[in-house]
Image (cartoon, rainbow, N blue to C red):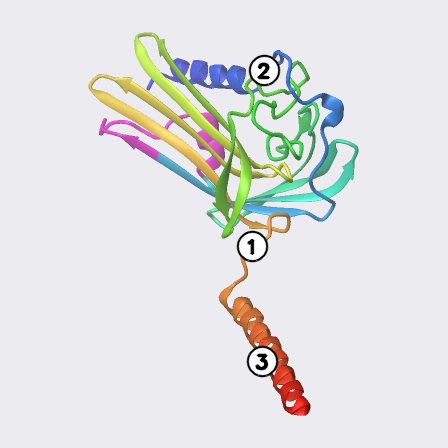
Amino acid sequence: MNSKVILVLCLMWIVIIFSFNGSCCSLSQSSRVVGVEPGAYNKYRVFTTWYSNDTTAKPPDDPSFRWGNPIDTYEVFVQEVSGTNISGYCVKNFRNGTKKIIPGWVDVATGEQHGEMGGIFVSANLSEGDYPYSPGAAFGFNVPINETIARTYLGVAREVNHVNIAQKMVINGQELLLSGNWYWDMYTGVTTEFSLTFRNWTAPYIYEWSILMVIEESTVIPEFPSIPILSIVMALFAVVTATVRLRKLKKCHTHR
């Protein structure tokens, strides 16, 4: 695929997602609040795919693909919270066993960020029609939240805010489609899942690559209890129930 086309595609994606301009949103900037506390931790599993029916094709020289392809897991640590600002660091755990630590911060009101914290956290308690970050601010998403839906993460059904982007275009005679989905936990503003897919049709060939990041551990989103814990809870319930019944039987015998 032509490198100029890839560059144009990436630039257009950035313009669509991270726009400096936007219309009015339903949630005011002053209403935006941080939904996590210092010490919060989230871990994500990262997947990348690449496909083409062109046997001479090579993996794309695309920033998102280059970013995600060598990463196995991605960890985010919150160290400080001040107003609408979250600061901490991200850890990239690479498939070759090495890692890279990236300090950073993000403002959940404006979306201003440093490092790689932008997008990982948004304001808590957003809903359908709200913007992830205030439009017109320094780093605002250019689209509102499409819907608030229930999805299961870590074995727990959570209400999440979903933003979907789909853009079809023709550049230099090549038909391109880029699409993305971003999900944030509604009550905490933590990213639970993110995916980005690029497709290019240059007859008779198809080129497609994608990146997917899904939460796999979290101190913010409670995990569904494991089987041993459930067994303990059920055993305790059985003991309490049996105790109550024995007491009732003793009372009955006493009255007789």
Q: Classify 10 Å Cα crowding around label 3: few (below 14), some (14-19), many (20 and above).
A: few
Q: Nearer the viewer, mark 3 or mark 1?
A: 3
Query: Residue at coordinates 65% horizontally, 83% vertically from top-left?
Result: 247
Q: Classify 10 Å Cα crowding around label 1: few (below 14), some (14-19), many (20 and above).
A: some
Q: CA distance from mark 3 to mark 2?
A: 62 Å
Q: As shown in the figure, which amino acid type bears the numbered disc 3?
A: Ala
Q: As shown in the figure, which amino acid type bears the numbered disc 2?
A: Ser
Q: Secondary structure at mark 2?
A: loop
- Give the mark nearer the N terminus: 2 vs 1: 2
Residue 58 figure quarter: top left
Q: Position of residue 21 (x, y in %)?
A: 62, 11
Q: Is residue 120 magenta?
A: no
Q: Is residue 53 magenta?
A: yes
Q: Which residue is mark 3?
A: 242
Q: Which residue is mark 2?
A: 19
Q: Which residue is mark 1?
A: 223
Q: Classify 10 Å Cα crowding around label 2: few (below 14), some (14-19), many (20 and above).
A: some
Q: For the magenta stretch, what is the residue range?
A: 50-69
